[in-house]
Image: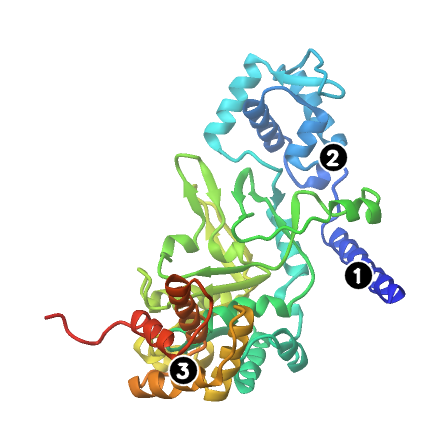
């Protein structure tokens, strides 16, 4: 048994080494200022802002803050010293090596830089490098097979034909249109599509368009994987460019809050920051537009926004200054709605979208499987008679379709009531009646 565990650990370590080596090939660490692809002026501005933000810094501090090697920074710091922007400060016990601080002239440079761009973080990557990295780790380079699809969704109850339609749609490279009643699992299933694309990817903290910086990394979207220790061991300090974070593939979901502005480069005038649009943050992953038809932007206008990116796999954006640029459009684009598609667009227009996949109510057998699994998860005794009462008497009598959201919601509310009344966790027919009355809105008119 111990040998088996050791062999499994060895295989995992080999996979990690291969993955880290691949990332280092996709974006190798720059060893010179030229290899960063950035101008000296941009780095001077960035470093000056770090000094302004934190006071005195050592070379090691600046390296950590900018994610650049000390050899690159020494060249920039030497220039800043020659321009009388920084000076050596008295050594401190908690600092190793020389410690620097801004001069009055350097402070003026930093304030001017901050007035032009409020970005203070790791050094950005040039636009050209960003394009190459996104294309190298494209989500469309992985063909999804039926075996992949059924394995990754084996832990949930879903109709097999529906699963096969989803799998084929993911391989198409076209937009996917999911529709059906609320609670049929459209959003939950679409968010799990990233499971079909294993492995880690690189997400830059920011991208430089000329000397303008657009922030890309979003901690709410990008799940960072800590590989620093294994990277040092495997790559001996020659790992991937540290201006990128190692992340899982992103899944960005937006719903009724979506506006047209969120699909363009966002400019925060107070902070003087540029932020990447949602689809750029979703690159190499899944972009889900949920509750289609509930947004402030008209559905037809929203569909039109994606025609060129979907056909050319390129998205065209612009900065407030008027500077235009393009980035790869490398996402699995999913529309999800509980409104009938023909109420959102005509058939001719919908043909351009790609796959239209309907999520329907469940069969009694599928509903029973979810009910049983929910009882196990919530540590509630499974009673077939209670289930039959819910299906036949409640759903049947009230003519309510069987949806995958109902078991967890109804059982949870019934348990809430049981704990409140008896301080015990259980369900019975009376408790399900109580849950039903509190879950569904009464159809009676107010008197």
Q: Which of marks 1 and 2 is nearer the N terminus?
A: 1
Front residue of 194/48: it is: 194
Q: Residue lying at the far front in this picture: please name it.
A: 422
Of marks 2 and 3, which one's residue comes earlier in the chain? 2
Q: Which of marks 1 and 3 is nearer the N terminus?
A: 1
Residue position for label 3: 402
User: Which tag is nearer the camera, tag 1 or tag 3?
Assistant: 3
- Circle 3: element type: loop
Q: Which residue is drawn at 53% across and 84% down?
A: 159
Residue at image mark 2 = 69
In whole angstroms, how far apart are the C-alphas of marks 1 and 3? Answer: 42 Å
Task: Say whether residue 283 is visible.
Answer: yes
Q: Which residue is drawn at 44% across and 35% down?
A: 272
Disc 2 element: loop
Q: Distance between the residues labelled 2 and 3?
A: 59 Å
Q: Nearer the viewer, residue 172 or 209?
A: 172
- Kind of element beneath mark 1: helix
């Amino acid at each position: 048994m111990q040998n088996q565990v050791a062999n499994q650990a060895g295989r995992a370590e080999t996979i990690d080494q291969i993955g880290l080596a691949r990332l280092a090939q996709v974006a190798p660490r720059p060893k010179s200022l030229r290899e960063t692809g950035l101008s000296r002026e941009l780095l001077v501005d960035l470093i000056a802002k770090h000094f302004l933000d934190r006071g005195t810094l050592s070379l090691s501090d600046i390296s950590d803050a900018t994610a650049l090697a000390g050899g690159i920074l020494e060249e920039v710091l030497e220039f800043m010293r020659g321009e009388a922007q920084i000076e050596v400060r008295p050594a401190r016990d908690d600092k190793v090596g020389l410690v620097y601080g801004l001069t009055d002239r350097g402070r003026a440079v930093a304030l001017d830089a901050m007035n032009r761009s409020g970005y203070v973080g790791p050094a950005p990557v040039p636009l050209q490098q960003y394009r190459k990295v996104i294309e190298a780790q494209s989500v469309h380079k992985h063909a999804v097979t039926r075996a992949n699809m059924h394995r990754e969704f084996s832990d949930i109850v879903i109709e097999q034909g529906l699963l096969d339609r989803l799998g084929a749609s993911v391989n198409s490279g076209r937009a996917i249109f999911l529709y059906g009643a609320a609670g049929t699992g459209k959003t939950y299933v679409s968010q799990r599509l990233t499971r079909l694309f294993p492995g880690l990817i690189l997400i830059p903290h920011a991208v430089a368009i000329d000397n303008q910086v657009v922030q890309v990394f979003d901690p709410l979207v990008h799940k960072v994987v800590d590989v620093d220790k294994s990277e040092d061991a495997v790559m001996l300090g020659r790992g991937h460019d540290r201006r990128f974070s190692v992340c899982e593939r992103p899944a960005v979901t937006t719903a009724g809050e979506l506006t047209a502005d969120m699909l363009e480069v966002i400019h925060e005038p107070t902070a003087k920051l540029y932020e990447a649009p949602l689809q750029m943050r979703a690159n190499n992953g899944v972009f889900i537009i949920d509750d289609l038809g509930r947004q402030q932007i008209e559905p037809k206008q929203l569909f039109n926004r994606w025609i060129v990116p979907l056909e050319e796999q390129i998205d065209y954006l612009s900065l407030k200054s008027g500077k235009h640029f393009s980035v790869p459009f490398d996402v699995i684009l999913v529309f999800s709605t509980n409104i009938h598609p023909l109420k959102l667009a005509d058939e001719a227009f919908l043909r351009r979208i790609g796959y239209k996949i309907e999520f329907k109510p469940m069969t009694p057998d599928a509903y029973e499987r979810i009910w049983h699994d929910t009882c196990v998860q919530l540590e509630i005794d499974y009673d077939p008679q209670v289930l039959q009462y819910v299906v036949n008497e409640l759903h049947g009598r009230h003519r309510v379709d069987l949806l995958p959201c109902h078991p967890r919601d109804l059982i949870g509310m019934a348990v809430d009531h049981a704990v409140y009344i008896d301080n015990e966790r259980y369900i019975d027919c009376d408790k399900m009646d109580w849950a039903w009355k509190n879950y569904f809105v009464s159809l009676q008119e107010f008197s």
